[in-house]
Image (tube, rainbow, N blue to C red):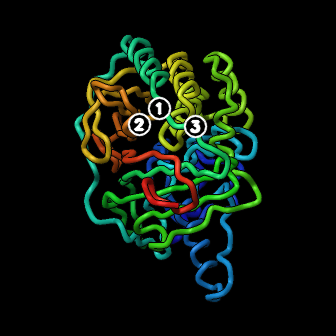
Amino acid sequence: MNASPSHRPHPAEWTETQGLLPSAERDLPAGRHQFHKEQMMARIHEDLRTSSRTSGTSPVAPVKRSNPFLRRTILLPAATFALAGAVAGGLALTGGGTPGGKTALATGPALTTRIGVADPKGAPQLLERISLAAADTSAPTPRKGQYIYIASKVADTYIKTEGDKSEVVSDELHSRQVWNSLDGRDGWLIEAGKTSDKGITLKGDTPFSGAYNALAALPTDPDTLLQQIYRESDAVRDPEVPRDQAAFAAIGDLLNASYPPAEVGAALYKAAAKIPGVVAVNDAVDATGRHGVAIARENDGERIEWIFDKKTLRFLGQRIVVVKATADDPLKVGTVTHTSAITERAVVDGNKQLPGQAS
């Protein structure tokens, strides 16, 4: 896959990580967001190549904390704001950038869905109910030395280009497991088809800023919390990226990828209710086929949907759906560019330990 000479980073790309962009052509119409493509896979393959060069007795080269987790829609500085690292559990590593333009998980045509009906007036009431449900959740309080474990299922649709041929392909649905220490200085990642079966280390000198301790320190007043999100986002985002969309994406990624204390989760939902353009959606489906209601926001023809169980209002996952397209856009209306489903969240006693497993 050769780099296109006319390619320039989309406004939704991280300004602080442009040096990590791989040589890959996305061949998309102007303005179409590609949320998690070549950058993350290029970094993962770089890390895996580094690991494979080490001897059997040498330690695996540590991964910088700011990397396999970057997703460009966040637009927040990972070292300074707790929400910036929130992508760790859900929407970071996706297809579209292995060496030579091939993706091991690319197995089928575009993922598609029926688009649910959006209701702007219903969003505040639904978010209030979701916030109350979140506040009533009795999540465990981790102890020093424990880890946050998140298991999920993810898949993506994207443009794959080889030579002068481009096609819309999808990843097969695959599993992802992430462990993070409470202080954000240690962790592990296993993702089918993206890492080895043993996974890669997330240990590094720079703490993972979306770690539990950092999230627990966030303000629980919705107005104060939202202003913090806006303030940090405005400091780094491209002016072409709407600040409301950047804030909505940041909150969604945090909910999808972390295990925040109940009061912080409730505050995030109340903060989201204050973002203009947020709507309720009557039906949405997560990566494992679970139907639910959704809170969503559209930008540039794509709608980010946070999916909740219709009865319990428990957070199930999120997806990104094309809701508007142009004639020359290969991603048609109804295309699901990303889908995820959280299958388990837990507090465990050690890195790489599974829930219920003895220490």
Amino acid type at circle 2 is: Glu
Q: Residue at x 64, y 42 (%)?
A: 84
Amino acid type at circle 1 is: Asn
Mark carried by residue 89: none
Do the numbered discs 1 and 2 sit on residues whose CB atoms are within 8 Å? Answer: yes
Q: How many marks?
A: 3
Mark carried by residue 302: 2
Asked if residue 75 is positioned above or below residue 153 in the image, the reply reads above
Mark carried by residue 141: 3
Residue 336 placed where, x, y %? 33, 45
Is the residue marked by circle 1 packed among few (<14), some (14-19), or many (20+) residues within 10 Å? some
Between disc 1 and disc 3, the foreground one is 3
Q: Residue at x 71, y 32 (%)?
A: 232
Task: Choose the circle earlier in sequence order: 1 or 3.
Answer: 3
Q: How far apart are marks 2 and 3 (CA)?
A: 36 Å
Q: Determine if residue 91 is in view.
A: no
Left or right relative to 212: residue 328: left
Q: How far apart are marks 1 and 3 (CA)?
A: 36 Å
Dot 2 falls on a residue whose secondary structure is strand
Amino acid type at circle 3 is: Thr
Residue 172 placed where, x, y %? 31, 61
Dot 1 falls on a residue whose secondary structure is strand
Asked if residue 305 is positioned above or below residue 91 in the image, the reply reads above
Residue 109 placed where, x, y %? 25, 58
Q: Distance between the residues labelled 1 and 2?
A: 6 Å
Mark carried by residue 299: 1
